[in-house]
Amino acid sequence: MESMNGRRIRLMQITHDLSIGGLQQVVVNLCRTINRELFDVSVLCLRDLGCFVPEVQALGIKVHFLPQKESSTDYLSFLKVGKILKHNRIDVIHTHNTLPFVDGTLGALISGVKTIVHTDHARDFPDKRRYMFAEWAASQFAYKVVGVSEHTSENLMKYEKISPKKIVTIYNGIDGKKFDIEVDKRGKKESLGIKGNGPVIGLGVRLSEQKGISYLLKAMPGIVQAFPDTTLVIAGDGPLEDDLKAEARALKLERNVLFIGPRLDIPELLKTFDLYVLPSLWEGFPMVLLEAMAAGCPIIATNVGGVSKAIKHGFNGSLVEPKNPQKLEKEIIRLLSTPLLLQNYRKNGHDSFVNYFSSGIMASSYEKLYLRQWD
């Protein structure tokens, strides 16, 4: 598929929403980076819109919205998706996670869309059986199914029995330009309410079980004992927000832990952090690590999922086992005590990002799928 009779190929990204999240950032970065001379891009949100909508619209990309019923599940929403695809004469759809995959595929079948590309952004397998069966069924009609890491791709084959011939691994990528900025660190710290000159540890994630934040909180008392002015900045919201705040109070960390809610100034925060810590229990290929690398922020992460494909222990970051606050505490203290190692992590992390994980590299891989030119 080189072109469609001399016109641009009409490509629609189908997602739950364009709220803050790694999946959504993949959609935004594809919109920003894809070859617009070849592809006419649009986005369909199935559940909600979200804060990234203005950024996508500023690129001249139309965002469609198909809200779900509030009172009950709309089992016929795929008919509405099909109507939108047909009305806009879409040639290729790219779906992201389960609901978009199922509704997008059914909509494509009834509207005549010829090429279906799907990305699984990782989750804790095995998932609910009905979800895994639905994705297996949808995969029969997809051109390719993408895992964002080898670990994710292996899970799709193992648990959903998707044919290896269908599976492709494409690492996430981001636009590094927004992280190439100068920041008044002192002013930023003051705006956040950080007092003193102690180290600043940070992370920006959804406050959910997956991210393992409780284990980082459990590590903090020992870190504070070694570095009394340490501040942990937690950006984001989610179902565990109240529980995590209560845990921080129980650990007597009120002075050392700041919950600052969801933020759109992540590049500035990353330039302010001395260390980024991601204590996840499971991951695919986390966007937040790429953001930290692009900003030159040193990283400690748990060795789960596809994390080790980005972070090489001792070279561009540190890896520790999950669910182990003692080892997390020990490694954080070691790094904060070794400024030269932190500086090496900054440089090597940024170099790794530029060489392997830019949005341009990601977009060129997806373009091959949209064109049905994957080798």
Image (cartoon, helix red, strand yellow):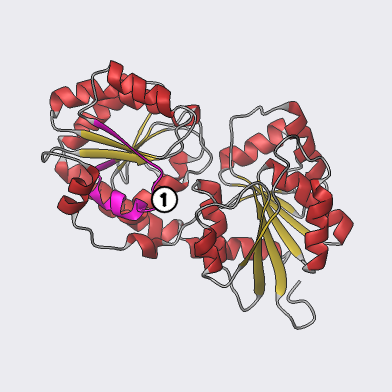
Residue 97 seen by the camera: yes
Looking at the rendering, in which quadrant would you find the C terminus? bottom right
Residue indicated by mark 1: 290
**Which stretch did the figure color magenta?**
257-275
**Regarding mark 1 in the picture, which secondary structure is present there?**
helix
Residues packed near mark 1 inside 10 Å, few (<14), some (14 to 19) or many (20 plus): many
Residue 33 seen by the camera: no
Looking at the rendering, in which quadrant would you find the N terminus? bottom right
Whether residue 197 appears in magenta in the rendering, the answer is no
Image location of residue 92, percent across then percent down: 74, 63
Nearer to us in this view, 220 or 318: 220
Image location of residue 189, percent across then percent down: 20, 46
Nearer to us in this view, 296 or 48: 48
At 26% across and 41% down in the image, what residue appears?
275
At 69% across and 62% down in the image, what residue appears?
12
At 73% across and 35% down in the image, what residue appears?
71
In the rendered view, does 359 fall on the left or right side of 164? left
Nearer to us in this view, 214 or 193: 193
Examine the image and state in which quarter residue 325 appears. top left
From what the image shows, is residue 336 above or below residue 175? above
In the rendered view, does 98 fall on the left or right side of 276? right
